[in-house]
């Protein structure tokens, strides 16, 4: 029976590159997938593109490609990635140039286009997922990108692409596309598409299934976490998968690590909505068949939704923030005094904020004051003040009121940091899938 | 006994919704989790942080529960003022739940009665 081996080479834009090189070098893989787009990444990338028409793709694209391209070319490993972000066309052109500079001729790079639906949303009247009209955003709207399914990626592979680079596509589609291409699955074979989507979901966060985001000493121990290896999914023509990693790398693949990743960012396990299928993970089973080898099967699927999810990036507000540390005897009392001082000063000077947080790091910044839990007096504590404003000017005033505790606050505050930034936030809406036309553009080195 | 002694958990985020999945280390403890770790109990425990409904999904085959917490991320990952905007640490907050000793015995006795 034919089997395809797919490596999960990145779980987010800033992920480690060394484990991806290890996958290409020693993983005996057919495909290497890099998932690099978080919800808001594309809105920030769109901004970069507005400033420079040749920008807007992943900032680590160059470094990643230089690291893996020679190995992938030598071994015939095909790459699928959403590192195109807001500008897959420029990303593809950049990869072509990188391949040429590495003396790798004949590499075919396909850009998948069509996810950018900003103009469609600007022309029409649409509501967001909260039922509010999108046109209220006006000039604050930065980007709108539809989640593409696997089809245009399959088309690119069928056209002989060695590398497929997309903007916004459903994360699992980066893995589902190679499976559809290799096994010839029908686009209405909901059962296999459901199982293939599970494989994609398991691999899309890379090290999160091989022991990353998992270790809890004494409870969940992970060996060699510093040398964490990234995952390999060996998939058969029915979509059944064995998850493993490069032999000798750090980390752990167990039923427990696979279960945690399967439900990561999943709501109803029986109805995981993607552009290609409504996947059903509710009857998945897992079996440890060897050290760091877990066999996973039993996902299925139902017909795909008629609409595509669209992620809309916009400028929401501004956040001003400052932090300061106190240590030694009386640290907690001085930190509390510092917070009270900042709160009073912001009132006295009339700083306009729609939302404020006054926190003690090490005491209550993560979960607030949890009922029933009285933290021990810390040796050191750090205050954090953050506020939401309508202008950068007001945000800066909040940050400055923390920093000036140096000279105008309690004794011996140290290590102040401050920041003021605008907030690019994301909301979502839906478009009929017919409104979105995806195309493939091919480059060759 | 803390929930942490018998279960592990992971939190994920989508917009202003958090999901926390909980897994029994030992399949024998899953019935206790399913009986005792209700959506109401989770909402009550995290009431300072979660301001919406809590929905629970059960996956007995994996010994797992999945909780979906609405309005749980201070307005959503991309605009939250919180230091942990993703709510990554919420899984650890859930594991601080105290399981009453009587609940554990209830599970053991039930198993005995079955035999």
Image (cartoon, coloured by chain):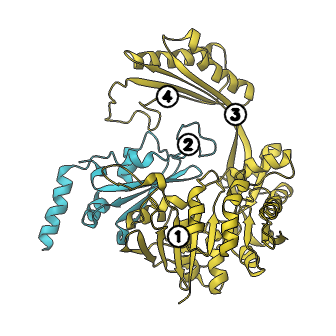
Chain colours: A yellow, B cyan
Estimate how packed mark 2 is, as few (under 14), some (14 to 19) or many (20 or more) residues with alpha carbons within 10 Å: some
Estimate how packed mark 3 is, as few (under 14), some (14 to 19) or many (20 or more) residues with alpha carbons within 10 Å: some
Which residue position is annotated with label 1? A232
Of labels 1 and 4, the one closer to you: 1
Mark linked to residue B85: 2
Estimate how packed mark 4 is, as few (under 14), some (14 to 19) or many (20 or more) residues with alpha carbons within 10 Å: many
Which residue position is annotated with label 3? A421
Precedes in sequence: disc 4 or disc 3: 4
> Depth check: A126 or A66 in front?
A66
Which residue position is annotated with label 4? A359
Residue B77: tell me if it is visible: yes
Precedes in sequence: disc 1 or disc 4: 1
Chain letter of mark 3 equals: A
Chain letter of mark 2 equals: B
Residue A306: tell me if it is visible: no
> Depth check: A37 or B60 in front?
A37
Where does residue A83 sit, x and y in percent of width and height? 71, 59
Estimate how packed mark 1 is, as few (under 14), some (14 to 19) or many (20 or more) residues with alpha carbons within 10 Å: many
Mark 1 vs mark 4, CA separation in Å: 42 Å
Mark 2 vs mark 1, CA separation in Å: 30 Å
Same chain letter for marks 1 and 3:
yes
Report which quarter residue A58 is drawn in. bottom right
A303 versus A247 height, above or below: below
- Residue that appears at 15% across and 73% down: B114
């Amino acid at each position: 029976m034919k089997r395809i081996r797919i490596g999960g080479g990145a779980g987010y834009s800033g992920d480690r590159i060394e484990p991806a090189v290890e996958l290409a070098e020693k993983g005996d893989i057919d495909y290497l997938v890099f998932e690099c787009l978080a919800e808001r990444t594309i809105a920030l990338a769109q901004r970069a593109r507005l400033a420079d028409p040749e920008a807007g793709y992943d900032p680590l694209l160059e470094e990643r490609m230089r690291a893996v391209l020679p190995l992938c070319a030598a071994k015939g490993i095909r790459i699928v990635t959403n590192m195109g972000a807001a500008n897959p066309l420029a990303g593809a052109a950049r990869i072509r140039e990188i391949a040429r500079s590495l003396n790798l001729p004949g590499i075919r790079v396909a850009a998948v286009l069509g996810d950018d639906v900003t103009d469609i949303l600007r022309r029409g009247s649409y509501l967001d997922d909260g039922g509010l009209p999108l046109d209220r955003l006006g000039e604050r709207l930065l980007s709108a990108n539809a989640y593409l399914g696997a089809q245009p990626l399959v088309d690119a592979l069928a056209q002989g692409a060695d590398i497929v680079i997309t903007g916004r596509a459903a994360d699992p589609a980066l893995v589902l596309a190679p499976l559809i291409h290799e096994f010839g699955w029908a686009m209405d074979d909901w059962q296999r598409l459901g199982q293939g989507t599970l494989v994609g979901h398991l691999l899309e966060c890379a090290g999160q299934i091989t022991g990353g985001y998992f270790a809890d000493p004494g409870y969940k121990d992970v060996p060699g976490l510093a040398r964490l290896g990234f995952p390999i999914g060996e998939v058969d023509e029915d979509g059944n998968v064995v998850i493993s990693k490069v032999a000798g790398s750090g980390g752990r693949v167990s039923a427990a690590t696979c279960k945690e990743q399967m439900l990561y960012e999943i709501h109803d396990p029986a109805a995981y909505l993607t552009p290609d299928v409504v996947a059903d993970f509710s009857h998945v089973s897992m079996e440890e068949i060897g050290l760091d080898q877990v066999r996973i099967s039993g996902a299925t699927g139902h017909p795909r939704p008629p609409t595509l999810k669209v992620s809309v990036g916009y400028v929401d507000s501004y956040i001003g923030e400052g932090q300061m540390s106190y240590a030694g005897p009386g640290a907690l009392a001085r930190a509390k005094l510092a917070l009270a001082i900042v709160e009073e000063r912001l009132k006295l000077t009339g700083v306009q904020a729609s939302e404020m947080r006054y926190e003690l790091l090490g005491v209550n910044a993560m979960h607030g004051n949890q009922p029933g839990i009285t933290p021990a007096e810390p040796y050191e504590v750090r205050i954090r003040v953050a506020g939401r404003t309508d202008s950068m000017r007001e945000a800066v005033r909040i940050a400055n009121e923390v920093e000036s505790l140096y000279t105008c606050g309690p004794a011996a505050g140290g290590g102040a940091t401050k920041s003021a930034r605008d907030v690019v936030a994301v909301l979502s809406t839906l478009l009929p899938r017919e409104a979105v036309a995806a195309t493939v553009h091919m480059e060759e080195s | 006994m803390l929930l942490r002694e018998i279960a592990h958990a992971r939190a994920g985020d989508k917009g202003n919704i958090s999901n926390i999945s909980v897994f029994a280390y030992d399949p024998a403890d899953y019935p206790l989790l399913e009986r005792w770790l209700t959506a109401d109990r989770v909402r009550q425990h995290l009431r300072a942080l979660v301001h919406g409904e809590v929905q629970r999904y059960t996956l007995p085959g994996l010994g797992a529960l999945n909780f979906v917490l609405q309005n749980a991320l201070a307005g959503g990952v991309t605009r939250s003022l919180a230091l942990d905007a993703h709510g990554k640490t919420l899984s650890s907050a859930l594991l601080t739940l105290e399981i009453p000793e009587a609940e554990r015995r209830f599970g053991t006795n039930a198993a005995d009665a079955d035999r």
